[in-house]
Image (cartoon, grey):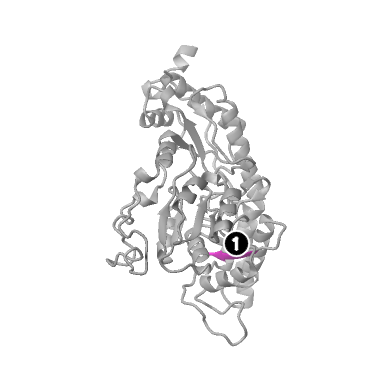
Amino acid sequence: MSEKAKAILAVNGGPKAIQTPIPARHHFTEAEKAACIRVLDEAIAAGTAPTYGGSEEEAFCEEFAALLSDRKGYADAVNSGSTAVFVALRALELPAFSEVIVPPFTDPGGIMSVVMANCIPVVADTSPGSFNMSLESIEALTTERTSAILATHIAGEPADMECICRFAKEKGIYVVEDCAQAHGAHSNGQAVGTFGDIAAFSFMYSKHVCTGGQGGMVYTQNEALYWKIRQHSDRGKPFGLPSGASNCVASLNFNMDSIHCAIGREQIKKIQVIANGRRAVANEIMANLADLPMVRPIPLPEGAESSYWFFRLLLDFEKLSCDKRTFCAALSAEGLGNSGEYALPFTYEWYPNRNVFGESGYPWASPLYTGDREKVFTLADTPNACKAMHDTVILYPHEGWTKVNAKEAANAIRKVCHAYAK
């Protein structure tokens, strides 16, 4: 086939750039199967059922904490990443109707956890080109009502935690890290999740590592806070309190059971291998696109290493003659799966409708909330986030991709860029 024929976009009848099948991840192996069987065999031998809160969870939590830092840390396994954020917020015992600064891009469960904890989400803007919120926006939104900052590491890209934590310490407000998408990500050699006061992780099936369909973890290096986490993740049981104490706070049962903990113990052994594999694939793609003027590098804080839960292809559409919808459709036709959109939960109907606690309008409607009860954040409040979304095409490479897969992905991108170059 001639080079001219190869250059015809697949959407216009040309050959696809992707010729090699995209491999499955195969991140579940006989090791996870054996771990489940071991827990079941132990239960059968004991004449009981698999439990929660026992030696399996204790081992999982200790092993996870040790992976994050050489410093003493404490972890508690829960049943989802959203639960982990909620438990983290509850454990901090934030004043009711205080404000929590949240990112514009996140899973809906992240912001919903704030209102379920009876606090007011205040939506920050991102840094230019980034999906993570900027220190400048946080500074502008901080008031005497601010009790916490919920910093999310979207796509595995670390937020600017050193600056955010320094500012929070000056203001005396808490920092919660949402690390759901950032297993194995680092800033200057320090793992995400170890910068703030408390961190939440997700082990949903699609994450770098998982505990099955769902799962989560709450982490801190503060022992007193750890006991609060334990209390709020298990119906207010008096963990860390003197013998004879009873349930000390109203909460629900968010525990992870021993089977899922056993899976997690095997999975977390692979975190760095998986993160490093994804970095290698992402670097290979970008190296093959380095000469394209319409492809821009992802802006990361100095010293930050993404773990690429997904890959953001950042484009300069002023150098292209098409819009993003057309670009994405052409890329899909070449055989490279992609998405042009990502979650902005404050644009979903629950938020402007204040649909949290029936028709009460709470927490915003509370007379104890001293901020602007009518304020509804919109896209106009987040111009950097809107521009970043406009310029981003999301791709889904993973650690199972080969150099051939990465090169073909880059070839698909190059082909579409050349076809629409101004």
Q: Position of residue 204 (x, y in %)?
A: 51, 55
- Locate the C terminus and report the quarter of the image it occupies: top left
Residue at position x 34%, y 47% in the image? 378
User: Which of the 4 quarters of the picture holds residue 280?
Assistant: top right
Q: Which residues are magenta?
A: 74-79
Q: Position of residue 349 (x, y in %)?
A: 30, 53
Q: Nearer the viewer, residue 284 or 173?
A: 173
**In the current view of this chain or complex, which residue is farthest to the right?**
70
User: Which of the 4 quarters of the picture holds residue 275?
Assistant: top right
Q: Is residue 277 above or below residue 95?
A: above
On whether residue 353 falls in the magenta region, the answer is no
**In the current view of this chain or complex, which residue is farthest to the bottom?**
244
**Which residue carries the number 1 mark?**
219
On whether residue 78 falls in the magenta region, the answer is yes
Residue at position x 44%, y 24% in the image? 416
Q: Is residue 357 above or below residue 180?
A: below
